[in-house]
Amino acid sequence: MSAPKRKTTKVISERNSIPELLGKKILIIDDAKVVVLRVEYDLRKCGFRKIKSLTDSREAISVLREFQPDILLLDIEMPHIDGLEILKQMGASDEFSKIIVLMLSASNEKRDRSLELGALSFIPKPWSIEKLMSTISSTCRLANRFGTR
């Protein structure tokens, strides 16, 4: 007799509550390839298909312009250009004003600063697939409801 699959059921019910998000384009920027692969896997498992990722933060602005994501999952601590600097560069241009930014980080130290610079939410590492989906869902709903993005 197999055990009930609670996590799968919860993820599926979460996915069903956000069908309008499944068509959104998501960009993941994190210097750790294992993190990028895990986030991509979790998003695809929940039904997202328009996903692009990169591990070299120096490419961030050009990829943002080219891909034009609806949602950006951005690491804070990265070599070359950190997530806070990317947020500053994004804030200096109206072309990025509609992107919903969620920060990924193992550290809470720069959380407040990232929110000041325009991130709408923070996902601590490590995360669960449920936490990832619920944070994306609630952040996008609030952004749309209050017109912040």
Image (cartoon, rainbow, N blue to C red):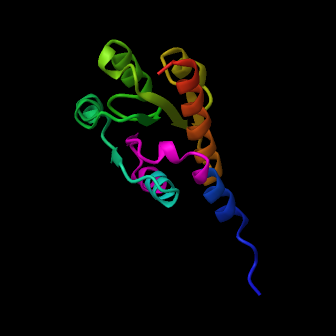
Residue at 32% x, 31% y: name it: 80
Q: Position of residue 141 (x, y in %)?
A: 58, 32
In the depicted view, which residue is nearer to us: 38 or 26?
26
Q: Position of residue 3 (x, y in %)?
A: 76, 77
Q: Quadrant of residue 94?
A: top left
Asked if residue 83 is positioned above or below residue 92 in the image, the reply reads below
Image quarter of residue 64: top left
Q: Is residue 22 magenta?
A: yes
For the point 58% across and 39% down, the residue is: 137
Q: Residue drawn 43% across and 54% down?
A: 40
Looking at the image, residue 72 sits to the left or right of residue 109; the answer is left
For residue 128, say whether it is visible.
Answer: no
Between 16 and 46, the residue placed more toward the observer is: 16
Give residue 115's quadrant in the image.
top right
For the residue pair 68 and 121, the one nearer the viewer reads as 68
Nearest the viewer among 142 and 2 is: 142
Q: How many marks?
A: 0
Q: Position of residue 93 (x, y in %)?
A: 31, 14
Q: Is residue 3 visible in this depiction of the protein?
A: yes
Judge whether 22 appears above or below 1 on screen: above
Compared with 145, 58 (above or below) is below
Q: Which residues are magenta?
A: 15-38
- Residue at figure coordinates x 34%, y 22% from the top left: 96
- Looking at the image, the residue that sits furthest to the top is 92
Image position, residue 17 (x, y; %): 61, 47
- 32 left or right, relative to 140: left
Q: Quadrant of the N terminus?
A: bottom right
Question: In screen coordinates, is 92 left or right of 131?
Answer: left
**Would residue 3 appear left or right of 124 to someone viewing this image?**
right
Q: Residue furthest bottom?
A: 1
